[in-house]
Structure formats: structure tokens, C-alpha cells
């Protein structure tokens, strides 16, 4: 089996680093692109070639032109975007890439629909997928009175990234504890980020169902639960664990992805509602996720499966995985610790043992079947890069 020539974008992300390590270990030739030199995955021993291109967030046309040139010059077989914006640009310009270059992503319409959090909350009930109680503010200035909101309320812009005249902007999830804070939060959002979903805050464990679909067939699946997050109130996982696949959530995830005519990888995120044990849909991330290394360590090598299945070399049956494997993002966990100890509205008081308990949990640095995405002893340089970035406050 000859190796493939692959270009991975967004090289300063942890997910890109996991992709590069996976595909490099599998014997493929991997180039890594990023808008700044010295990115995390640029430092990996499995990065065969470094590409620096204009920022897709601020200079989209220049990014497209530079990327097209690199795909041709390097004779790339597979383009593998990692972040939201690069993925959306790649699929919208699919016809412009070199003919030999594969793009194992869904259609532009599927990515757009999956990224639309408001539209997803309208789609899910039609498919029998439970969601949090949700109200929608369609445009700035709309009244929220009469919605019967129960605080705290989660505010979710329709999209995590939106294109505006001056470039791409992030739609950040926020929280409100009363009417005044709700109105202030709504007023802070740019008009392009509307509509905004207002949702009840579900109490219960968060978990993800991960899937890889190629030509309409499920070729891999995996599930994990979040043990600690940054910020602690809800965000990216800094400590997570592989768990048995929850049959109800998998059924809901497949129903959603099938309805979207999905192709490629996706993370479908749920919370298990402590009131009735129902898995309630939070969102779909139609790309590789930050805790990807956990799935690989547990036995589901999503990057290799996706690329090789797309090339007609994939497994016949979805692989099994080990339950109870943990993955820890060290510097993210440090940030989470600091927020709990010293951040505004510190949550340490609500944890058994208070601040001492938080510190004691953090200091459990090693346990059976716990891995770190960094450092990796066979690939240490990304750890040094990430540490420098954390010290400088750029990570």
C-alpha cells in the first residue's frame, strides 16, 4: 500500500497534532499548514513539510490562492482541514482544488446545516432527538418577556463562526443568571451572530458520540465522557474518559447525521439530564475534536480510518475500543484549576473538599490507563512549544 501525501491545516490545534501523529505513524507523508510559523504540529517529528499560509480568518482570498498552490506543488492526495473556518472554505471551493486531491468532508450544505445550532434544535425534535428547552431570539432588540425562562440560561449564537465584511467572527456561548445579565449578553452579540438560542442549563454529565461515515456507511464510532472542563462551568474537556457506547445517544447521533447526508467525521455532543436520564442534544461539531487523541489511544484511529476508507482501504467493520482510558490536556487542566481557585465566581466552594479537594484532584498526575496528549515521549517537541505558548499567554 503506497503512502498518501496529505496536507493537514490548522497546525496549532491539538486536534491537528493528533491527526499528524496518527497519519505519520501509519507511514503517510504529512504536510502541516498554519498561518503562523512554529505551530504546535509543525514541531512534530511526523510533520514532513511545513506550510505557512495567510490567515483564513482575515485574508480568505489569499488563503485560498496559497492553499491551491501548495496542493499542486506538493502533489497532495488528501486535503484534511481541521478547524471550522478552513473546513467551510474547503468544501465551498471543492471544485477549485486539484483533481487528484481528495477532500473527505461532507457537502457545503451539510456542514452549514450541522453548524447552525438554532436550525439543529428545530431539526432534532422532528427526528425524535431530545433537546434542552429552547427559545430563539431572532434578531437584536427582540423581547424575551413571556418566554418563561428559568435561570441560569445558556446563550448560543446560531453559529460558532460567521463571515462578516471585516472577516470571520466567533459566536461564543455565554450564560445569564437573571434578566439584566441576559439583556446585557444579548446586546454584546454582533447582529451577524443572530438568531440566538436561549436554553435551559442541563444538569448532568456531558459526553460525546463520535462517528466516521464514508459513502453512507458507519466505519467507526466512539464515546467519551467529560471529567473536567475549561472553563469548569462548561467548555472544552481537559480530562475525559472512554465509556461504553450509549445505545440511545448513538441512535440519535446516527439519525441526525443520516438526515444531514453526512460524510466524514463528526462529534455529536449530549448531556445526560439528571432529571430523567435522557441524553439531550447540545450540538454537532463536524470536524476533528480537541480530545481526538483519547479515541486513538483507546483503539479508534479516526484520522487513519477516515483517510484510508476514503481511499478505498478502510476496515470492513468498525473497530472496538477500550473503556476506561483517560486523556488529560495538562495545560488546559492547569487553566481550569486556576479558574476554580481564583477566577470570578470560583466554583471550588461547590466541590467536595473545597479548594483543597480541587488541588488534590489535580495532583493525581498518574493513574492506570491515563494518557497525556502532551508530552509524548516519542514526540516531545510539541510539548515544549505548547509550554512556551502557555507561559506567554498565547495558548
Image (tube, rainbow, N blue to C red):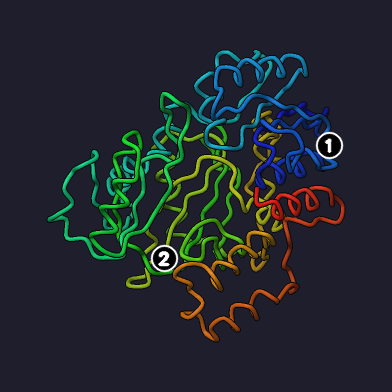
Q: Is residue 95 left or right of residue 163?
A: right
Residue at the image position 81 percent from the left and 29 percent from the top: 49
Q: The residue tagged with tag 2: helix, strand or loop?
A: strand
Quickly name the residue at label 1.
27
Q: Tell me: residue 374, above or below residue 272.
A: above
Task: Characterize the local packing of mark 1: few (<14), some (14-19) or many (20 or more) Cα atoms within 10 angstroms.
Answer: some
Distance from label 2 to label 1 (Cα)?
Answer: 39 Å
Q: The residue tagged with tag 1: helix, strand or loop?
A: loop
Q: Residue 275 at x, y = what percent?
A: 33, 72
Q: Is residue 156 left or right of residue 340?
A: left
Quickly name the residue at label 2.
272
Q: Tell me: residue 327, above or below residue 161.
A: below
CB under 8 Å between discs 2 and 1: no
Residue at the image position 29 percent from the left and 46 percent from the top: 187
Q: Residue 258 at x, y = what percent?
A: 43, 39
Task: Characterize the local packing of mark 2: few (<14), some (14-19) or many (20 or more) Cα atoms within 10 angstroms.
Answer: some
Q: Tell me: residue 272, above or below residue 209.
A: below
Q: Quadrant of residue 72?
A: top right
Quadrant of the snapshot with the N terminus: top right
Front residue of 324/149: it is 149
Q: Residue 332 at x, y = what percent?
A: 63, 59
Residue at the far left: name it. 146
Front residue of 328/276: it is 328
Residue at the image position 81 percent from the left and 52 percent from the top: 384
Q: Quadrant of residue 104?
A: top right
Residue at the image position 58 percent from the left and 13 percent from the top: 96
Amino acid at each position: 500500500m503506497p503512502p498518501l501525501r496529505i496536507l493537514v491545516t490548522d497546525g496549532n490545534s491539538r486536534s491537528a497534532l493528533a491527526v499528524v501523529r496518527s497519519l505519520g505513524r501509519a507511514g503517510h507523508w504529512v504536510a502541516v499548514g498554519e498561518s503562523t510559523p512554529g505551530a504546535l504540529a509543525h514541531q512534530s517529528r511526523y510533520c514532513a513539510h511545513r506550510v505557512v499560509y495567510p490567515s483564513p480568518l482575515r485574508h480568505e482570498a489569499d488563503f485560498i490562492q496559497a492553499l491551491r498552490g501548495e496542493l499542486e506543488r506538493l502533489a497532495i492526495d488528501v486535503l484534511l482541514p481541521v478547524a471550522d473556518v478552513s473546513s467551510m472554505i474547503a468544501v465551498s471551493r471543492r471544485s477549485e482544488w486539484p483533481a487528484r486531491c481528495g477532500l473527505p468532508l461532507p457537502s457545503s450544505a451539510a456542514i452549514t446545516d450541522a453548524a447552525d445550532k438554532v436550525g439543529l434544535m428545530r431539526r432534532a425534535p422532528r427526528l425524535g432527538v431530545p433537546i434542552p428547552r429552547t427559545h430563539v431570539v431572532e434578531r437584536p432588540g427582540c423581547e424575551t418577556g413571556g418566554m418563561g425562562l428559568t435561570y441560569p440560561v445558556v446563550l448560543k449564537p446560531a453559529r460558532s463562526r460567521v463571515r462578516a465584511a471585516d472577516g470571520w467572527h466567533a459566536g461564543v456561548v455565554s450564560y445569564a443568571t437573571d434578566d439584566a445579565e441576559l439583556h446585557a449578553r444579548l446586546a454584546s452579540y454582533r447582529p451577524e451572530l443572530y438568531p440566538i438560542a436561549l436554553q435551559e442549563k442541563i444538569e448532568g454529565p456531558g459526553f460525546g458520540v463520535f462517528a466516521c461515515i464514508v459513502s453512507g456507511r458507519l466505519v467507526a464510532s466512539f464515546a467519551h465522557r467529560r471529567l473536567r472542563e475549561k472553563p469548569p462551568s462548561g467548555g472544552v474537556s481537559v480530562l475525559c474518559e472512554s465509556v461504553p457506547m450509549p445505545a440511545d445517544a448513538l441512535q440519535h447521533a446516527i439519525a441526525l447525521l443520516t438526515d444531514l447526508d453526512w460524510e466524514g467525521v463528526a462529534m455529536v455532543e449530549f448531556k445526560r439530564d439528571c432529571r430523567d436520564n435522557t441524553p439531550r442534544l447540545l450540538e454537532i461539531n463536524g470536524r476533528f475534536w480537541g480530545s481526538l487523541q483519547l479515541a486513538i489511544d483507546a483503539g479508534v484511529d479516526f484520522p487513519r480510518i477516515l483517510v484510508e476508507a476514503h481511499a478505498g482501504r478502510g476496515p470492513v467493520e468498525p473497530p472496538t475500543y477500550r473503556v476506561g482510558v483517560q486523556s488529560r490536556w495538562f495545560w488546559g487542566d492547569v487553566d481550569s484549576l486556576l479558574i476554580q481557585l481564583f477566577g470570578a465566581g470560583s466554583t471550588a466552594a461547590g466541590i467536595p473538599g473545597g479548594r483543597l479537594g480541587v488541588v488534590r484532584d489535580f495532583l493525581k498526575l498518574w493513574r492506570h490507563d491515563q494518557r497525556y496528549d502532551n508530552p509524548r515521549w516519542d514526540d516531545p517537541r510539541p510539548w515544549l512549544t505548547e509550554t512556551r505558548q502557555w507561559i506567554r499567554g498565547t495558548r
